[in-house]
Every structure is written in C-alpha cells, then in structure tokens.
Image (spheres, rainbow, N blue to C red):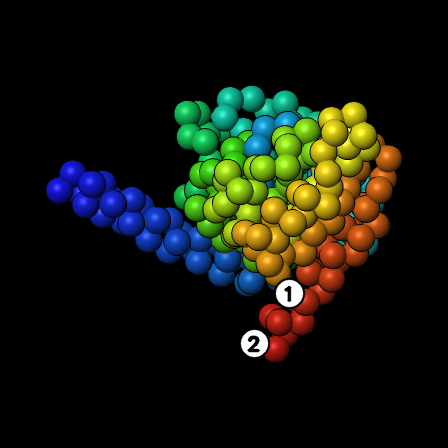
C-alpha cells in the first residue's frame, strides 16, 4: 500500500511537471527559439562546453543560457563574460531543474531581453546523472555528457539518462590515454541502452569534435525553425 501511494505521488508530480514543460515549449515555439537541455554528472564539462559553444557560434546564432546550480552563480558568472543573456536559477536542495523553475527563468528572460531576437536557449541542468533526465523542462532536445574520467560502465549503471538523450557527448577525450578507458567500449555501452543516439567525441581543450557539435546545434536550430514555419 505504501509503495502504491508513493508511486501515485511520483506519477502526479511527473504529470504536473510535463504540463509545465509543454507550456514552456509553447513559449519557445511562439518566439521561434530552440531549447536544448544539457545534462550530466558534476564535472563532466557542461560549462566548459558551453564556453566553447558560445565562442564558436557567436557570429551565427543568438544564444541565451538558463543556468541551474544548487547554491552559487559561479558557472553563470563564467558564461556572462561572453556577453550573452544568462539567467541563474539556484535549486537549493533539489538535484535537478523542473519545468516550474525553468518557467521562472523564462519570465526573467522575457523581462530583460527580447526573446524573439534569440535563436537558441541552452538550459544547463544541475549536475546529476539521474533526476534531470526524468523531468522535462520544455526542451526540444536532450543532450547528455559523459566524461571519459567517469569510466566505461556509467551508461549501464544510469540507463535513464542515456536512454532519454537525443545526443551523447563523450567529453574530455584528451584525457583518455591517462585514465585507461576504451572509447569504443563506452560507445558500445551507450548504444546498448540507446541504439539510435547521436554520439560525438569531444575535447573542449584540444577542440576535437567541436566542429561537428557546432554543426549539429546549427542544424537543430534550422530544423526547428523550418518546423515552426510549416505549422503557421
């Protein structure tokens, strides 16, 4: 009985969150914005990847960031140096952003900037390999990062994150020779969970794979814009 009650509460929470996510996505669609939800464990390189992305796409896309962190604005401050709108959300004890939190970020963005002038909003989720994958925030695509320093077995141990991802970025590949991991084995474990996921091998330090990642982001924004035109 207790387990049934807990499951019912969880189902209601997820259902309410999904309604909020659909509402957020409707805002993004109305403004012609593509939203990407960036997820990973702590230290996998989300903020460093965002820094490289903001630099690499500064002349082609207008980008804003909704930055989720439990307590500080350290990552938000790093990204503000690139001259893009950055909305910081502190989640307190919560290990993920949910659609209500992101809705608050959207309203802040709307108050201080012109949303229709943007092409892309990147939500940098709280560092956690479990919770963020279960709570949609209104994104059009989920992108998960896995650092080579985390080992080859993480996709098998934390399958929900990897099953939900549209794109999987294997990061910090420049460290692979030093941590004795097999990148092919990592990819095989990922595809065991999600056979059709798009995978990029990246190093923000050396630049490996960044061109392909930038191209994917640009193509995703273009496809979303075309889809919205077809629905008008």
Which quarter of the rendered picture does the C terminus lie within?
Answer: bottom right
Find numbered disc 1 in the image and state the secondary structure of the residue it sits on.
helix
What residue does disc 2 label? 231
Please tell me which residue is depicted at 72% across the width and 33% down the height of the picture.
181
First in sequence: mark 1 or mark 2? 1
40 left or right of 49 in image: left
- Disc tally is 2
Quadrant position of residue 218: bottom right
Is residue 208 visible to the viewer in this orientation of the structure? yes
Foreground pick, 184 / 4: 184
Find numbered disc 2 in the image and state the secondary structure of the residue it sits on.
helix
What residue does disc 1 label? 224
Residue 30, given in percent of the width and then of the height, sits at: 55, 63
- Mark 1 burial class by Cα count in 10 Å: few <14, some 14-19, many 20+: some
Please tell me which residue is depicted at 41% across the width and 25% down the height of the picture.
93
Which quarter of the rendered picture does the N terminus lie within?
Answer: top left
Residue 47, given in percent of the width and then of the height, sits at: 68, 33
Residue 41, given in percent of the width and then of the height, sits at: 57, 32
Is residue 76 visible to the viewer in this orientation of the structure? no
- Height in image: 64 above or below 48? below
Mark 1 and mark 2: Cα distance apart in space? 11 Å
């Amino acid at each position: 009985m207790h387990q049934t009650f807990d499951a019912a509460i969880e189902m209601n929470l997820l259902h309410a969150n999904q309604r909020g996510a659909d509402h957020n996505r409707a805002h993004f669609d109305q403004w012609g914005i593509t939203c990407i939800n960036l997820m990973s464990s702590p230290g996998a390189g989300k903020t460093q990847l965002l820094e490289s992305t903001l630099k690499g796409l500064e002349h082609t896309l207008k980008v804003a960031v909704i930055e989720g962190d439990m307590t500080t604005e350290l990552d938000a401050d790093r990204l503000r140096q690139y001259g893009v709108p950055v909305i910081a959300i502190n989640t307190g004890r919560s290990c993920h952003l949910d659609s209500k939190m992101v809705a608050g970020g959207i309203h802040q963005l709307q108050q201080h900037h012109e949303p229709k002038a943007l092409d892309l909003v990147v939500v940098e989720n709280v560092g956690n390999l479990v919770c963020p994958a279960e709570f949609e925030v209104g994104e059009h695509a989920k992108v998960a990062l896995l650092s080579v320093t985390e080992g080859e077995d993480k996709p098998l141990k934390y399958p929900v994150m990897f099953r939900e991802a549209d794109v999987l970025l294997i990061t910090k590949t420049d460290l692979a020779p030093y941590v004795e991991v097999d990148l092919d084995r990592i990819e095989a474990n990922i595809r065991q969970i999600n056979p059709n996921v798009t995978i990029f091998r990246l190093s923000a330090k050396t630049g490996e794979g960044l061109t392909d990642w930038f191209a994917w982001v640009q193509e995703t924004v273009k496809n979303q814009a075309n889809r919205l035109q077809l629905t008008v």
